[in-house]
Amino acid sequence: MGGAASLSAPRALVLGAALGAAAHIGPAPDPEDWWSYKDNLQGNFVPAWSLCAVGKRQSPVDVELKRVLYDPFLPPLRLSTGGEKVQLIHFNQELYGNLSAASRGPNGLAILSLFVNVAGSSNPFLSRLLNRDTITRISYKNDAYFLQDLSLELLFPESFGFITYQGSLSTPPCSETVTWILIDRVLNITSLQMHSLRLLSQNPPSQIFQSLSGNGRPLQPLAHRALRGNRDPRHPERRCRGPNYRLHVDGAPHGR
């Protein structure tokens, strides 16, 4: 939801991460409550964030289609949520017991990235999620509001194509434990909805307001990492195996 790009440019949308962390209440604010990329933060002033400055597998990266390697053996993508919290950050339960441990270990996290474009209309999921009645109830960190009958299927575009690569969290501490999965379609969001996201605070109300709009990180070097896709750009007519969504929200299965 970064503020660095122009409104007309597609951008990545990752939901649920910023408002899900624990609050820090005390005389001095936790660095996690006030960092921003507006001043080109790269982790130089917090020792635990050193990977933001010196890491070799950082995110986001510039995805050039000519560099994407076609991989016909990419497995279908299966997603599942338990109903307690809807996030597009998933951890490897076979290796790690919780999200915190997974964020520090190899191959611990998978982040599904959806690109959005400011337009005159909006995706139905975003329209429901970002309407005035909902967005005004979650203005600060740790605010929560329960939405009934909201299907994740409305969020995902009809697409058989995706690109994946090994990278990092795009926010501090920039841990290099993430498998990024980029859906190759763009969702529409209105300018008013984008503005409402920029009015959200990444801090609790007891601290100085820090807008979420400063969390768009500059592009990082791809170096020698591979970009793999399940669609062959040389043969676009070839039908490839695509994401197979198995979504479970509040115990009710939905899927294709």
Image (cartoon, rainbow, N blue to C red):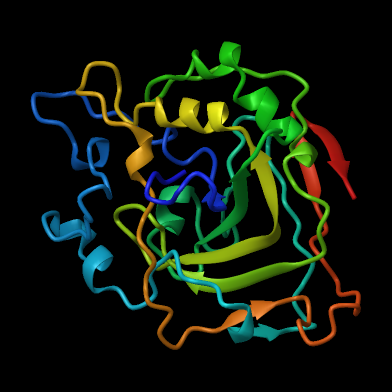
Q: Position of residue 137 (x, y in %)?
A: 50, 13
Which of these two is toward me, 212 or 178?
A: 212
Quarter of the image where one finds residue 181: bottom right
Q: Residue at x 33, y 60 (%)?
A: 174
Where is 159 relative to 149, above or below?
Answer: below
Q: Residue at x 57, y 14 (%)?
A: 132
- Residue 105's x, y, as percent? 41, 65
Q: As displayed, is residue 79 above or below residue 30? A: below
Residue at horizontal 14 percent and vertical 54 percent from the top: 46
* Residue placed most toward the observer, 195 or 214: 195
Asked if residue 94 lies left or right of residue 231, the reply is left
Frontmost residue, 73 versus 134: 134
Question: How many numbered callouts?
Answer: 0
| Residue 175, horizontal then vertical, whole percent | 36, 62
In the displayed structure, does residue 140 sit left or right of residue 132?
left
In the rendered structure, the answer to whether residue 137 lies left or right of residue 79 reads left
Q: Residue 108, image x and y in percent?
A: 50, 63
